Image: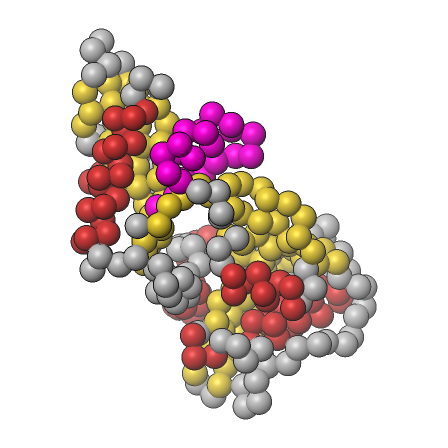
Amino acid sequence: MRIYQPVRGVGAALRENSFMIIDDAGVEIGQGGLEFRVLRKMFEERPLDIEMTINAHPAAIDTLYGALVARAERIKLENENLPARLYTRCSIQDTAKYSYFINMGFDDRDGIELFVRYIQENATQRQNYPPIGTKCEDADLHTRARREEFLQRLKSLGDEPHAEEWLSDQMRNPVFSAKVVMYGSEFAGAVLVTGSQQEAVVQMIGVEPKWRGRGVAASLIDEVLLQLSGQKVPYLVVRTQRRNQRMLRLLKRCQFEWIRTEELLLGRDM
């Protein structure tokens, strides 16, 4: 059995963060990789987010796991030794993977949680308003540069990185809403919602740290709800990590209902 770094990365992981294992006959029996982001604005106390992807035969999993954990430790050192969270995705039904990682010291405190808000048709009242002096308006996405700027702002706040082409495709959906809260020329927060006539989904939402706790995110959600109500869309859906306590408080304030845990994020702090 031999472990090595492949010519190309595993999945979206870079080559230097990827490993493969072959047996004595040269047959691949395992592969894994690490993706990481520094999310200072989302998780101030533990900003280095390291996701482990691993797929291996039982005979190879310990070796592959050890290599990935060692590389994760190196990533931590290369990023100013920031407090980190190492985790792997696990379906609710995958009891074998769950048991393996729990035995390796991972916990099940985090997961992808599904929330839904029922939207009253033709609703005209709102509960949350933007801070005094700010204005909630449709985002200017008319040019490629504007679309890239919009995505970059949300990426800096912790949302998934997306290319401008992805946003252009989203704009073709039957339901689309991109709104920002501005204080003059200063950006305070933004939300992106797409979907169908049956349901809309919050794809991205973020608020600059200095504006948090002042109702910016709640006012953005209310703006979206009013738009969706007029379009007779019955549901607004949000998926969020359980450890994102700020987002959970927002969803409670905006009267979303928790539906289920869709996926476990088994992890441990580093």
Image side of residue 40 versus residue 150, left or right = left
Residue occupying image coordinates x 56% and y 34%: 92
Q: Residue extending furthest top?
A: 25
Which of 178/124 is in front?
Answer: 124
* Residue 100 part of the magenta segment: yes
Q: Residue at x 65, y 68 (%)?
A: 253
Compared with residue 185, is residue 34 higher up or lower down, i.e. above or below? Answer: above
Q: Is residue 142 visible?
A: no
- Is residue 248 found left or right of 143 in the rendered image? right
Of residues 213 and 28, the one drawn nearer to the viewer in this rendering: 213
Q: Taking the image as drawn, is residue 238 in sight?
A: yes
Q: Position of residue 172 (x, y in %)?
A: 58, 55
Relative placement, left or right, of 104 versus 109 is left
Q: Between 16 and 264, which is closer to the camera in this rendering? A: 264
**In the image, residue 192 above or below residue 32:** below
Q: Is residue 67 above or below residue 184?
A: above
Quadrant in the picture for residue 25:
top left
Q: Where are the magenta residues, as a range?
A: 86-106
| Location of residue 83 in the rendering, given as x and y in whole percent from the top left corner | 30, 57
> What coloring was used for the rendering?
secondary structure
